[in-house]
Image (cartoon, rainbow, N blue to C red):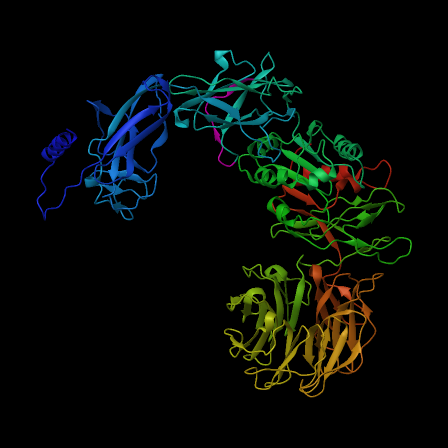
Amino acid sequence: MKWLLLCCAFLLVLSGCTKHEPGTALENKLPKTFLWLAPDSTLAQGPSKEHVFWWGSDADGFVKGYLFADGKFTITNGHASVPANTAWRWRTATDTLVAFPLLVKRDTFEIVVRSVDNTFLSDVKDGASIFLSPFPYWDRNNDSIFDAGDERLTTLTGAMDPVGAALGIPVYNQPPSVTFAQNPNGAGGIMSQPDTTYTAVTFAWVGTDPDGDNTIMRYEFALNDPNDSTRIYYVPASVTMVSFVVPRTRTPDANGEVDADVYTGNFLTRRLLPTPIHGLRLDTLNTFYIRARDIAGDTSHTIALPDPTAIPVKHWYVKNPHGKLLLVNDFITNVTGNRDQVLQTYVSSLNALPGTTFQQYEILDIARGLGAGDKQNGTLGGMVPPFIDPAFLFTLQLFDVVVWYTDPWPSLPVAQLPLFDYVHDPTHPGKVVFSTMFQSAIDPRGALRDFAPIDSVSSVDLLSTDKTTGKRLVPSLGDTRLTGGIPIPPDSTNPANIFPMLNVNGNSTNFFSVFLRPVYARADARYIYHVPPYQPNPVVRYAWSTTFNELKSAGYAGSMMTACGTNGLIITSTDGGQSWARANTQTTFSLNGLKSISASNVVVVGDSGTIFGTSTGGITWNNYSVPTFENLQSVDFISSTAGLATGTNGLLIRSTDGGVTWTSRQSRVTKALRAVAYADANVAVAVGDTQVTRTTDGGLTWTAVPGAPRLLYSGIRFVSPTVGIAVSHDGAIATSTDAGATWGTVSTLPANLRGISFADGSNGWICANVTNLNDPRGVIYTTADGGTTWSAAVLTPVWQHLDAPVPVDAANGWCVGTGGVIVRTTDGGVTWATQPPGQINFAVEDGSRSFIFAGLPLHVLNGGTPGVNDLTAFFSYVLFHEFGFQQ
């Protein structure tokens, strides 16, 4: 019986099989697709985000992936009519979360999925956009057209389910939500207004909608009463930040309320909306309310700022500004006075101004609640609005003049952009007086230069003498002292515009530590005050200079002196160092070595193979740099064409065309070569970190000099074709009498020797700095016998390192060093003076006479005579003469 049943089953199977002729290809069976919605087994109306699942089967292979589409399609008998221009998405997963863009309360959307089997041969990334018309292709650049870069999918049509699975999903709209934006000032958390603002304020928010953020239609906000429909103000969904501004001249109504102009965007891109918002209350508390509304008509919950549920309770008080002047208090307690005393100095000075124009003014305390550590860490005071741009800029524009005074830690993030735009905005050009100090641990020159009329600030601190012993103290950061009663004279270069005299507060028993650094005026600005070089006690120990960069090398030929240094600096002088011109090198690499070949030709070398040359006396400079990561340290020329340059890791290069082109030579050493010098056209010696190398064929080949003293060499010069002298940071001097073939140590000096040069065969100088901690100043050693003997250290008037001597003849010459210092002698090195003569410029005025920058705290320059207020005279001159206001 079992056998009979098995036979019947076998016959049934045979009868159901399709006969396949040998030698003919089997036709691919297309896959099928199945689709369902989770979690319910029955389709019901749900939210506008749904989790959709599908799967596929293939009778003769496997499913490689799926094409997925959703939208407003027509479904007939389970089949969807999908438009030809529909973008399908390639998916390898079997589920996705779909968000439907609801435009009404309720609607039905369709989704379609098509399985694709393994006969599809292209490799498409998950999520790729695929179009099926006019032929299947992968839209790689997502521009909805077939163009260059897109990939045609020739095997897709024969591999996909021709019908697919379709499902219509009824969904209902979900309301949007809105929250206030994050505080961009780095404080974290949601933005909040200061507890008091003037009539300029900015609000920003973020709106979201489960149906898609693009379904948010608008935002609706109001001041103080969200239930009064006449107060509701509308902006489109594209606007997520508004600023309310009430000009100082606008008068409130009988209820104390006023219309506020409404701006969108930041300050530079601001757009004034045609209709103001009503209901801002002056000199009392205010509240801002906002909600979002979507296209379907649903609204979010209304939120408020200040938040009425916050603990502790917060307030937003709007103060109606009076007067044209805003006094910005950016000061915490320090050695120049406490906050209240300093504020009172400015208040009393402004109160004493003549006339009625500035009888009223406002005080904005942006440093309230901060300590020194907070300001150094970049923390901003509670009176700084969360959006400096545009809220703080709009606040400044309520006034015609801003007087801003700081401690050694100015709130530069608050000042940097607003003050620049405040002064340069053509619709409301403001006037500024900015008084600050320079805390030593931070170099503030970059940010200050952005908004103030200064080119740079010296990076070298100014230091003072000890009043008791008369000796110089060990250098300490920011230890600049101004003695009470010292006059602070104005600049007198423009006799028609001389500012009033200022005086340091108190008398000779008082002093102020003020963190002074010289400032250098922008090209369109002029100096207006300086600290004189003749302070009785203490003396500010610093030399005025043309730059804050370190000058590392210098040269003189004809009538032109040239110096180079850090940050790509090249300066030239043709009037004996009285004035200097700065070259535009377009580089920030340090320039370490220089050779003045003639009055017209100079070659400069520096870091990363940087080489510049001029043949026009410094009017134009050409870039002849070589491709290397090594830093070039020195350069020398024996003629107008033949030159050598050395650098780190034993780099040595040679030029035969005046420095235009260079070829690398094998130096036979591996450490840095710090200096190079020719003895004659054939012989040259390069020295560096414990190594000496020599050439006798004009630089083609080199040989390390055996037995040379192992010193940290810093400079070398040949007095004659046979006699050479090299100096070292160790203080040792090495001499050769056989054109550099052998070297011996002659003497050791108690200093860090940094450079050597000769005016002739007898007279030469070594520049150095004394390492004696009781008096660490720059010194010069001189010789009149070709280097056989050297003088005792000649003290210079500066405390910077001296890097390079530049003797012109036996009597005249210069020496340059760190901090841009330049000193000069006219008596063979016996005495030295700063060049140009020492005077520390600390205050400048821009060319339009609208911005005054003082690098000293004005409140300590208010006078030493009781009853005499120097700042009143200063502000009177500035406001009525420079800024042009009427009394």
Q: Which quarter of the rendered picture does the N terminus lie within?
A: top left
* Image: magenta residue range: 268-279
101 and 559: which is toward the camera: 101
Residue 56 placement, left or right of 2: right
Residue 278 horizontal/vertical position (percent): 53, 17
Residue 362 horizontal/vertical position (percent): 68, 28
Question: Is residue 808 found inside the magenta-colored segment of the image?
Answer: no
Q: Which quarter of the rendered picture does the C terminus lie within?
A: top right
Residue 576 horizontal/vertical position (percent): 68, 68
Residue 451 placement, left or right of 516: left
Res 114 visible: yes
Q: Please report the residue visible at 69 percent of the width from the left and 54 percent of the height from the top.
A: 459
Q: Quadrant of residue 197?
A: top right
Res 406 visible: no
Residue 678 horizontal/vertical position (percent): 63, 81
In the image, residue 531 above or below residue 799: above
Q: Quadrant of residue 413?
A: top right
Q: Please report the residue visible at 80 percent of the width from the left and 34 percent of the height from the top.
A: 341
Q: Please report the residue visible at 47 percent of the width from the left and 26 percent of the height from the top.
A: 207
In the image, residue 636 above or below residue 618: below
Q: Quadrant of residue 814?
A: bottom right
510 and 804: which is toward the camera: 804
885 and 141: which is toward the camera: 141
Residue 694 placement, left or right of 405: left
